[in-house]
Amino acid sequence: MSGGKGDQDGYITKLGYALLRLDKVMELETPDGLTMREIRIRVPQAEGDDYMVVVKATAGGHPFVAFHAAAEAHEALKGAIERIANGHMKWREDRPYQPGVEPARPG
C-alpha cells in the first residue's frame, strides 16, 4: 500500500467490507459442512511474497485447514471469504506436515 491519505482510506474501506463479510461467514456452516474456528493473516515474509490467509475449521469433530493468498491483505481476506462462502475453498486435514502422505478431505 502506498500513496496518500485517499489511498489509505480506500484500502481501509476495502478491508472493512471484507471484515463485515467475514463476520457473516464465521456465523454459518459452510456448504462443505465445516464450522469456522480460526482465521489468520500472514504478512509477506520477503519482497514479492503474498499475504496468506490460513483458515481452520472443524467437521464431524475433525480439524481441517485451507489457504488463500493475494498481493494485498484485503484481497487475500476477501478471496478466502468468497471461497468459503461459495464452497470452492480446498480443505485438507489439519495435521503436521508429513511428506508423501495424502491428507484427508472433508465430505
Image (spheres, rainbow, N blue to C red):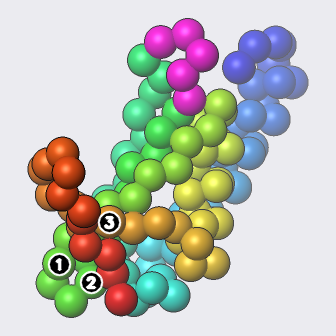
Most distant residue in the right direction? 6
Residue 102 against residue 14 in the figure, above or below: below
Task: For the residues labelled 2 and 3, say whether their Cβ atoms are less than 8 Å apart.
Answer: no
Q: Residue at x 46, y 46 (%)?
A: 53
What number of labels is visible?
3
Residue 88 against residue 15 in the figure, above or below: below
Would residue 98 be found to the left or right of residue 6 on screen?
left
At which x and y percent is residue 11? 74, 34
Q: Amino acid at mark 1?
A: His
At which x and y percent is residue 79? 64, 55
Q: Which residue is mark 1?
A: 62
Using the rendered view, name the quadrant where residue 7 is placed: top right
| SS of the residue under disc 2 | strand
Residue 47 against residue 73 in the figure, above or below: above
Task: For the residues labelled 2 and 1, say whether their Cβ atoms are less than 8 Å apart.
Answer: yes
At which x and y percent is residue 31? 51, 87
